Image (cartoon, rainbow, N blue to C red):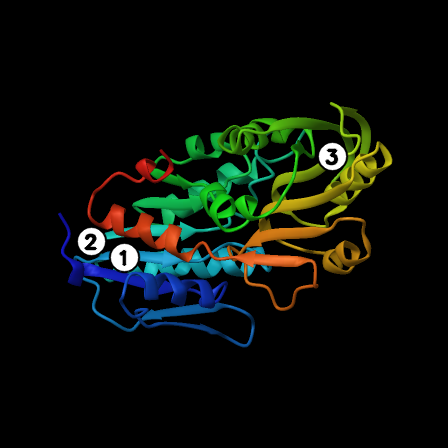
Amino acid sequence: MCKNDELRIFSGNSNIPLAKSIASYLKIELSPMDVNYFADGEIFVQIKKNVRGRDCFVIQPTSPDVNTNLMELLIGIDALKRASAGRITAVLPYYGYARQDRKDKPRVPITAKLVADLISSAGASRVLTMDLHIDQIQGFFNIPVDHLYAVPVFIEEYLKKIRFDLFASPDIGGVARTRAVAKRMRKRIVIIDKRRQVPNKSEVVNIIGNVKGKSIVLYDDILDTCGTVINAANALIANGAKEVRVVGVHGVFSKNAQNRLGKSKIKEVAITNSIAQKEICDKVKIFDVAPLIGEAILRIHRNESVSSLFI
């Protein structure tokens, strides 16, 4: 079993506030890791503290700019490996490229698998992540993966404090995710049947279930352009829903998404701080997952069960 003085927490530039919060939960300081850039954009990383034989965790969600943050993570892992770290855990509260998880068209990549291979090849011993787009991505890795869920945070900090009648899945693919949280809250679900012809554009075709006069929570994992949830909310309200809130784990918010949310019929949007936000609109509420991730890190460090966090 690892000793407390063997634990080292590092962070890239992707979400330093979250990394500091995790370190605070663990009652330790972030270990210094310099991440600098050459004039041509090349990334240079130097570990500024002895890590020989230590249990090291690198916190770096691969959020926008996803490519830059991914390279910071890979180079940081390589630096730790060459500094003789005892064990290296890549902590990705948000796993970028997760939506490229299958060959659904001819001659396209499975980039989620490529990223998994890159992280393993860089020298990571294991991965800690949260709310993957699909659970099967865990199988893309040849190293252990600990998969966390933000559901307990949302239930305790948000869902128990509001009044609503139903959960809604914004698409068929999210039914299992929505059903899991609905089961814990003892609520029924309705399903939005949508079609997506091109990336980031979807069309609601049908609503499966009665929503007339109901207050509804749309539950999703990634809020990107927010076209899906806005279209879903419009369809629910057009079919008689009283009000619609959105709970989404990862607030990517690209392409002016927050302005669109502000002008939409959605009453409120709840997200986690898995991705750092430069600014948020009045409808968005952010909930802290640092204690959840910190507790998982502590359990990994002590070789204890992580899955028991969700029992």
Indicate the position of residue 23 as horizontal and vertical percent values.
Answer: 33, 64
Q: Which residue is mark 1?
A: 56
Q: In 3D space, how far apart are the residues under numbered discs 1 and 2 (Cα atoms)?
A: 7 Å
Q: Mark 3 against mark 2, which lies toward the viewer? A: 3
Indicate the position of residue 263 as horizontal and vertical percent values.
Answer: 82, 57
Residue 86's disc is 2
Please tell me which residue lies in front, 81 or 288. 288
Going from N to C along the chain, the mark reached first, 1 or 2, is 1
Indicate the position of residue 189 as horizontal and vertical percent values.
Answer: 64, 27
Image quarter for residue 80?
Answer: bottom left
Q: Horizontally, is 37 left or right of 20 in the view?
A: right
Indicate the position of residue 245 as horizontal and vertical percent values.
Answer: 69, 45
Q: Which residue is mark 3?
A: 214
Residues at circles 1 and 2 in contact by the CB criterion of under 8 Å:
yes
Q: Residues within 10 Å of mark 2 (few under 14, many from 20)?
A: some
Q: Secondary structure at mark 3?
A: loop
Label 1 amino acid?
Cys
